[in-house]
Image (tube, helix red, strand yellow):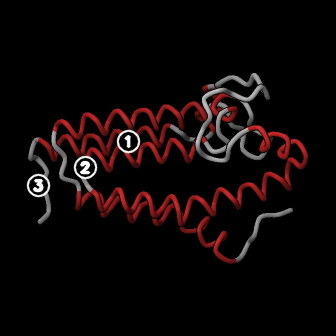
Amino acid sequence: MEPRESGYYAWAARWRVPLGFAVSIAYLVLARPTPGYLAAGSVLVMLGLAVRAWAAGCLEKSARLATGGPYAHTRNPLYLGSSLMGAGFALAGRSIVMAAALGALLTCIYAPVMRREVEFLEGRFGDDYGRYAAQVPLFLPRLRRAAISAERFQWSRYRKNHEYEAALGCAAGIVFLVLRVLHWIPSFP
């Protein structure tokens, strides 16, 4: 079965990146970091970044079904990592508005995108995906890994999936917050 190409699923898939950038711009305006919140939020950001890096190093997009590494705990470790990064930045910036925007993105955009990807993977990998999905939760990870694959992280996959771009983006975001804490970048009224 091919994923739905029209309707809300397709709309969410098409707009997830532009909406993410719009939320990021709003964040630049609304962030009011303090040293303590910045430190706590940065821990979450780094955890999310580590989850995304691990997932990217185990993923060969559309070539084979990823079931090892973090994919043995959750079928969507990239989105889980992004959610942790977003929560970390919301905490670091002390912004309840950004926390609400993150919740809205996750609920209204990423949940339908994950469902659309389920349809794609069912169509691409058939019963193999069905067996995998029966053992591994869609989003929230379970701590005990499913005994599906012993796939290992590979730096070549990490690079091929351009995950270093997320690391660079996180570094830029944290530098921005540090400069705001130091009052080198003023807060907007």
Question: For mark 1, what is the residue?
Answer: 170
Asked if the residue at tag 1 contacts the one at tag 2, i.e. Cβ–Cβ closer than 8 Å, the answer is no
Q: Amino acid at mark 3?
A: Pro
Q: Residue at x 52, y 62 (%)?
A: 107
| Residue 158 on image: x %, y % | 59, 33
Instruction: Name above or below for residue 33 compared with residue 108.
Output: above
Q: Quadrant of the N terminus?
A: bottom right
Q: CA distance from mark 3 to mark 1?
A: 20 Å
Q: Secondary structure at mark 3?
A: loop
Q: Amino acid at mark 2?
A: Gly
Q: CA distance from mark 2 to mark 1?
A: 13 Å
Dot label at residue 186: 3
* Pair 2/3: label in front: 2
Question: For mark 2, what is the residue?
Answer: 93
Q: Which residue is more in the foreground, 180 or 69?
A: 69
Instruction: Name above or below for residue 179 compared with residue 53.
Output: below
N-term-proximal mark, 3 vs 1: 1
Report the residue that reaches farthest toward the right: 127
N-term-proximal mark, 2 vs 3: 2
